Image (cartoon, rainbow, N blue to C red):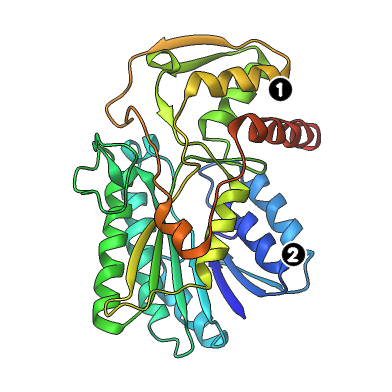
């Protein structure tokens, strides 16, 4: 099959591309290589993908409908879409809100419009986020929970994507699955995320900031488990009258951020300098994924504990710092 993959130079996109290519699929990747974080990391991921014979890459912004339309004219054999491109980062949405609406809302709309023109498209899988659960108090988070209390603009844009997808499924029968990712980490990760920035600071002997002393809890999910969920979902398009659904992908464990710091200290062989400050309003106290639905659909079972995943990340981190 031919898979169109947006965000191909991104953290999750790169790993999904590797998995699909390893299965012998053709991957048509797109990414705008925006400078939200170090573009050298994105280019390094792309270099590894370009070495594969079944990978094609297009440097474009998926929110630009005039660039996307001719690309889909060239690749009419696309049978699946994995749409992962987005402006990421909860806190950055306070700094540059316009980029979130442009990338996440307009970009999603452009992809939906392009997707419905493909007569052979079987499934449209896209990235949502655990952030849509916002101020929900009941744990673990279930797909049936209400998600109308976002606490960040980022979360609001991703919930808008879910609603648009439901409308397109209702109007055009476009089969779609939205995946609510829970705190993804691992090799080739994003430098703006806590585990990565903590590692850099610990190595440099610089202080790290922990909210509420690191007592916030997150469902830390290793990237290989995320990829298993994404690829597994591709083979199971929804068949309901309105073929749209959302699924959680998480580790089904709720762990304190200070445990993450402890594991980084052990793997790096250094002690963190910690500053504790109150939790900001856009950060929730806990996230915790119920994964029964995706498990029933695909057999998904998270396999990697935080204690296993952090040393793997640190091994890559040391190698990357040595080569960057």
Residue 21 percent coordinates (x, y): 70, 68
Where 208 sits versus 147, above or below? above
Residue 94 percent coordinates (x, y): 31, 36
| 253 left or right of 48 in image | left
Q: Which residue is mark 1?
A: 267
Q: Which residue lies at the image location 27% right of the left edge and 76% below the top edge? A: 242
* Label 1 vs 2, first from the N-terminus: 2
Q: Which residue is mark 2?
A: 50
Where 255 sits versus 109, above or below? above
Where 48 sits versus 321, above or below? below
Q: Is residue 198 visible?
A: yes
Residue 39 percent coordinates (x, y): 62, 47
Quadrant in which the C terminus appears: top right
| 258 left or right of 313 in image | left
| Element carrying mark 2 | helix
Q: Which one is nearer the viewer's eye here, 115 or 171? A: 171
Q: Residues within 10 Å of mark 2 (few under 14, many from 20)?
A: few
| 229 left or right of 113 in image | right
Label placed on residue 9 = none
| Element carrying mark 1 | helix
Q: Residues within 10 Å of mark 1 (few under 14, many from 20)?
A: some
Where 232 sits versus 193, above or below? below
Q: Which residue lies at the image location 33% right of the left edge and 43% below the top edge? A: 141
Residue 311 percent coordinates (x, y): 70, 30
Q: Which residue lies at the image location 38% right of the left edge and 35% below the top edge? A: 287
């Amino acid at each position: 099959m031919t898979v169109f993959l947006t965000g191909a130079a991104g953290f999750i996109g790169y790993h999904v591309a590797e998995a699909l290519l390893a299965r012998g699929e053709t991957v048509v990747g797109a990414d705008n290589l925006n400078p939200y974080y170090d573009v050298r990391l994105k280019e390094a991921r792309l270099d590894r993908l370009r070495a594969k014979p079944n990978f094609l890459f297009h440097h474009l912004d998926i929110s630009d409908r005039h660039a996307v339309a001719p690309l889909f004219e060239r690749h009419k054999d696309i049978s699946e879409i994995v749409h992962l491109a987005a402006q990421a980062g909860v806190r950055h949405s306070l700094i540059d809100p316009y980029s979130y609406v442009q990338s996440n809302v307009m970009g999603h709309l452009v992809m939906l419009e392009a997707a419905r023109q493909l007569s052979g498209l079987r499934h449209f899988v896209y990235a949502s986020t655990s952030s849509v659960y916002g101020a929900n108090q009941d744990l673990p988070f279930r797909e049936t929970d209400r998600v109308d209390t976002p606490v960040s603009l980022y979360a609001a844009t991703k919930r808008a994507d879910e609603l648009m997808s439901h409308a397109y499924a209702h109007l055009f029968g476009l089969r779609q699955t939205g995946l609510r990712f829970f705190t993804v980490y691992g090799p080739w990760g994003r430098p703006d995320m806590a585990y990565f920035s903590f590692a850099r600071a610990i190595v440099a002997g610089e202080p790290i900031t922990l909210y509420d002393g690191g007592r916030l809890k997150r469902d830390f999910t290793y990237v290989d488990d995320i990829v298993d969920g994404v690829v597994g979902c591709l083979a199971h398009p929804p068949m309901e009258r309105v073929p749209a659904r959302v699924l959680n992908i998480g580790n089904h464990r709720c762990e304190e951020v200070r445990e993450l710091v402890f594991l980084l200290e052990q793997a790096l062989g250094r002690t963190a300098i910690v500053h504790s400050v109150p939790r900001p309003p856009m950060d929730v106290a806990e996230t915790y994924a119920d994964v029964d639905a995706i498990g029933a659909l695909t057999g998904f079972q998270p396999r990697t504990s935080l204690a296993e995943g952090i040393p793997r990340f640190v091994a890559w981190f040391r190698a990357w710092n040595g080569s960057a």
